Amino acid sequence: MKEFEIQKGYETPFRVESFLPSEQREWILQREKAEQGVILLAEDREDEVMLLRRAFAEAGFLNPLQVVPNGEEAIHYLEGEGKFANRHEYPLPALVLLDLKMPRKDGFEVLQWIRQQPGLSTLRVVVLTASDAIRDVNRAYQLGANSFLVKPVDFPHFVEMTQALKGHWIWTSEEPETARPSPATVAEAANVDHGSMLSRPSFAEMLNAEG
């Protein structure tokens, strides 16, 4: 059996045959990454990140997943600033999964910023949040969200939602052309009423319910 190595730097690792020359391994990794399309998840709760990773695995959603814990880092990632300057390690995403209630900058501010950047105006953004408040739904679409999804309350439905994401946004949708935005000043955070939030079980409770 051939030996494999895990490529670090991605939440979803690639497996590359270790006996290949390093230049060839890198070329294969970049080709697979380009073909699959990176997904950027902006989510501040680690249990939600773990849940989504497991749902991705269950649904066979193998696209590389990059995670940022707040809206400010989401913007830095898309700008290619600071630690995200290396586009080989942190490529522009094909799809953004965006939570609304995050520290530093919330999802609305991130979405508004994205749609103000000429190079990112066509980037596909799916709001994925626990809020079902109609004012949040309306505002997200007004700011340019492509879709608004309420986080499921159990793991099997989380997997179903992930399968739908894979089928619609990755397989059947043509990826728009995006470009790295020029440096821009981002407005200070505004207070946003996120409305009512769904009462959702914890990650552990979901897994226990599944069992």
Image (cartoon, grey):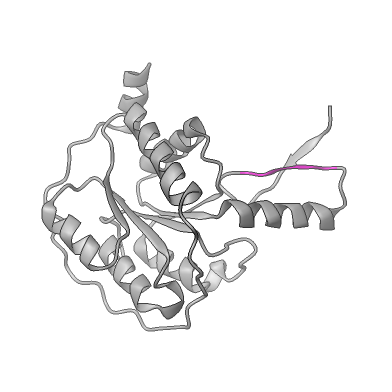
Q: Residue at x 56, y 67 (%)?
A: 83
Look at the picture and state if 140 lies above or below 196: below
Quadrant that contains the N terminus = top right
Q: Which residues are magenta?
A: 13-18
Look at the picture and state if 134 lies above or below 86: above
Magenta highlight on residue 26:
no
Look at the picture and state if 13 lies above or below 183: above
Q: Nearer the viewer, residue 146 or 7?
A: 146
Q: Tell me which corner region of the image, top left, top right, bottom left or bottom right, holds residue 203.
A: top left
Look at the picture and state if 1 lies above or below 94: above
Instruction: From the viewer's perspective, tell me whether residue 100 is left or right of residue 184.
Output: left
Please provide percent x and percent y for residue 70: 37, 59
Please provide percent x and percent y for residue 199: 17, 37
Please provide percent x and percent y for residue 101: 25, 55
Q: Nearer the viewer, residue 64 or 51?
A: 64
Please provide percent x and percent y for residue 167: 45, 42
Quadrant that contains the C terminus = top left
Q: Residue at x 20, y 71 (%)?
A: 190
Instruction: From the viewer's perspective, tell me whether residue 129 is left or right of residue 70.
Output: left
Q: Residue at x 28, y 69 (%)?
A: 109
Instruction: From the viewer's perspective, tell me whether residue 175 is left or right of residue 197.
Output: right
Q: Tell me which corner region of the image, top left, top right, bottom left or bottom right, holds residue 48.
A: top left
